[in-house]
Image (cartoon, helix red, strand yellow):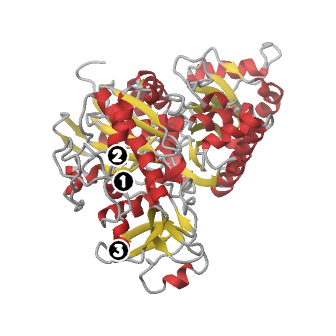
């Protein structure tokens, strides 16, 4: 390579280098470590290696790039275009040779055979470097003079044509090798798995002829729902997505009740493992049918889940996670075959399970961290996944800390008198008029609000059956904004004089949301349950902020299904999370699934999250002396000591009323608690 050689810049990676005239663009990309797919090994038959040239003068790079700086289309490329068709402006990088300076675009969405494409929940496109590669190879025919076996000649071919040496071979292939080679007339495609660059390559599947496609699944096993994406390993496209509810719900609504079930029933662990694996198999059938592919074409798989789901999926007893010190059986990434976890796919299909962060902060939080990347940015980012245990991650590129807080099941609707899971009939949105104290609400499964025409008709099918998590957050926040509850969470009984919505229950009061069957109210006990849950979450967040030495966060990601439906404004009014610019509080609902997909399509992300998880400081909230102090302050709405200036810009918070003991830490006046 000399200074006079053409300069080639690859986009979007930005990698660049000089290459002698006549070098193929594919070889140049490989030399620089730019990932360009190739199945046929440069024979111009697979079409996977497509690139395009950006024309023009790129002053910043000192490059004048032109189509003419590539060799003209030759016979092999012309044949591919004629038979399979090349999109306008695309070239096959294995055939196109460098003649002059170039800016080369590597498209991340090379579509072959007009693959069916479904809109996935998240259409982010990632750089690819999958663990499974498809390698077309021409094998020498058997010869009496050379006694090398079929498999051995295949390995010679892989070494000569793909520079793959020291290959391990899955035993299940041995009985099939003879017939596959003959069926393909000595031309076959080998699926080679290599999780790390320094791993020995492993032959996991073999196909006659050119096999120009391979798939993988990425799956988030949530305690309530399981979501799966089917992606092409060769183009990165999400081909199908599907979700189902976790059948383990029949053993217990929340995680801890499922652990109790295992403790109480000797068969419990096995039954729950079987239930989740059956659900996964059902989802695999669905994504395969939607994508029009065979199960055997799935060659790689990635799974994430909270620690208890992670253990049950792997067939590990989760009992240890039910109490201190919450010891995980395995915290690092787990690599195995899909068969070993009861998923009949291809006999060679591999499975990668992301690492868990701690006993209560699972592989789902690790995947969400990978997707949102607090460790890649300067801003201090808070991520919370709210469930029975809130998983909390706080950090930036300098340091990341994580903890879990025992929020209990209140946010999921349990322990709330009118609470229920988010399902048709559940109230999910609530507004309260501060003058009349009259509520209006919206129900899952019905479009209109309760005060709009057509509401009665719309809810006739689903009914008004309870309040789900996001509805509980809103109704309590709205009760606070309307002055129905004080900052200490006490329902103001004196309001019963002016509103029939305030009902007396012995020594306390409740608020009537909906008069029907069932009658839906928010009781004093409900408010307390939410206060306890949100105080536990906030105290956990504050501990992490203490560890980071910060008094505010720049960005908040609310993960999980609950985070998707919760209105950030009400999360702040309630004091669930610290004050933050509302524009920077976002639901990152499918972040865990996105992280799983990243690990499916690029092994580099596996190393990134393994390394990040090793470096995350885990904080055990129960052991921290300041937890109690933060917890007590966080019982108030939004908080006894912390101010919410960003929130105050968009919402008029009730004035703090005076307290008999006079004053408070914030110097504001507050009313005496009436309990
Ligand atoms: Fe297969 Fe270029 S590598 S067409």
Q: Secondary structure at mark 2?
A: loop
Q: Residues within 10 Å of mark 3 (few under 14, many from 20)?
A: many
Q: Looking at the picture, tell me which residue is in the foreground, 173 or 9.
A: 173
Q: Looking at the picture, tell me which residue is in the foreground, 486 or 453.
A: 486
Q: Residue shown at 42%/26% (left/top)?
A: 619
Per the model, the C-alpha gap separating discs 1 and 3 is: 21 Å
Q: Secondary structure at mark 1?
A: helix
Residue 229, percent from left and from top: 57, 48
Per the model, the C-alpha gap separating discs 2 and 1 is: 7 Å
* Mark seen at residue 437: 3
What residue is pinned by disc 1? 571
Left or right side of 218 for 98: left
Q: Residue shown at 52%/33% (left/top)?
A: 360
Q: Is residue 462 above or below residue 335?
A: below
Q: Residue shown at 73%/24% (left/top)?
A: 170
* Mark seen at residue 577: 2
Left or right side of 402 for 418: right
Splitting the image into 4 quarters, where does residue 270 fall? Answer: top right
């Amino acid at each position: 390579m000399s200074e006079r050689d053409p300069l080639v810049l690859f986009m979007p990676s930005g990698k660049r280098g000089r290459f002698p005239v006549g070098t193929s663009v594919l070889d140049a990309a490989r030399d620089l470590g730019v990932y360009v797919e190739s199945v046929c090994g440069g024979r111009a038959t697979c079409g996977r290696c497509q690139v395009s040239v950006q024309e023009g003068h790129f002053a910043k790079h000192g490059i004048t790039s032109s189509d003419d700086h590539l060799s003209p289309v030759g016979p092999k490329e012309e044949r591919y275009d004629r038979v399979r068709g090349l999109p306008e402006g695309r070239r096959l990088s294995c055939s196109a040779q460098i003649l002059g300076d170039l800016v080369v675009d590597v498209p991340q969405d090379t579509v072959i055979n007009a693959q069916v494409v479904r809109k996935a929940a998240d259409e982010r496109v990632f750089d690819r470097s999958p663990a499974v590669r498809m390698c077309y190879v021409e094998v020498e025919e058997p010869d009496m003079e050379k006694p090398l076996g079929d498999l051995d000649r295949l390995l010679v071919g892989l070494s000569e044509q793909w520079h793959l040496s020291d290959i391990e071979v899955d035993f299940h292939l041995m009985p099939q090798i003879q017939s596959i080679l003959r069926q393909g007339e000595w031309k076959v495609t080998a699926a080679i798995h290599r999780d790390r660059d320094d791993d020995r390559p492993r032959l996991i599947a073999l196909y006659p002829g050119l096999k120009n496609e391979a798939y993988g699944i990425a799956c988030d096993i949530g305690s309530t729902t399981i979501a799966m994406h089917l992606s092409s390993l060769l183009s990165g496209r999400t081909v199908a997505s599907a979700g189902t509810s976790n059948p383990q719900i029949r053993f217990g609504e929340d995680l801890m009740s499922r652990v109790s079930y295992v403790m109480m029933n000797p068969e419990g662990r096995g039954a729950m493992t079987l239930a989740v694996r059956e659900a996964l198999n059902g989802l695999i059938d669905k994504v395969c049918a939607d994508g029009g592919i065979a199960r055997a074409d799935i060659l790689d798989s990635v799974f994430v889940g909270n620690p208890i789901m992670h253990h049950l999926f792997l067939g590990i007893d989760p009992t240890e996670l039910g109490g201190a010190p919450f010891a995980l059986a395995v915290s690092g990434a787990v690599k195995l075959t899909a068969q070993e976890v009861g998923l009949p796919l291809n006999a060679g299909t591999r499975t990668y399970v992301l690492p868990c962060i701690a006993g209560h902060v699972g592989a789902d939080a690790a995947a969400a961290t990978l997707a949102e990347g607090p460790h890649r940015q300067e801003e201090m980012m808070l991520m919370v996944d709210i469930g029975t245990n809130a998983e909390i991650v706080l950090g930036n590129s300098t340091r990341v800390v994580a903890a879990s807080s025992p929020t209990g099941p209140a946010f999921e609707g349990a322990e709330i008198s009118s609470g229920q899971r988010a399902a048709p009939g559940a109230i999910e949105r609530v507004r309260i008029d501060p003058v009349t104290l009259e509520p209006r609400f919206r129900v899952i499964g019905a479009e209109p609000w309760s005060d709009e025409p057509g509401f009665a008709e719309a809810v006739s099918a689903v009914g008004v059956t309870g309040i789900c998590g996001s509805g509980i957050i809103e109704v309590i926040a709205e009760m606070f904004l309307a002055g129905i509850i004080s900052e200490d969470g006490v329902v103001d009984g004196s309001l019963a004089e002016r509103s029939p919505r305030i009902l007396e229950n012995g020594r306390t009061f409740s608020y009537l949301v909906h008069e029907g069957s069932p009658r839906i109210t928010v009781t004093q006990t409900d408010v307390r349950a939410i206060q306890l849950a949100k105080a536990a979450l906030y105290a956990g967040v504050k501990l992490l902020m203490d560890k980071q030495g910060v008094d505010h966060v720049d960005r908040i990601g609310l993960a999980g299904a609950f985070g998707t439906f919760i209105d950030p404004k009400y999360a702040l009014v309630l004091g669930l999370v610290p004050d933050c610019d509302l524009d920077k509080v976002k639901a990152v609902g499918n972040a865990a699934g996105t992280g799983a997909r990243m690990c499916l399509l690029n092994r580099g992300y596996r190393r990134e999250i393994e390394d990040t998880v090793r470096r995350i400081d885990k904080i055990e909230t129960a052991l921290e002396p300041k937890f109690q102090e933060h917890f007590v302050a966080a019982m108030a709405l939004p908080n006894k000591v912390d101010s919410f200036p960003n929130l105050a810009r968009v919402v008029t918070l009730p004035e703090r009323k005076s307290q008999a003991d006079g004053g408070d830490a914030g110097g504001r006046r507050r009313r005496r608690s009436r309990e």
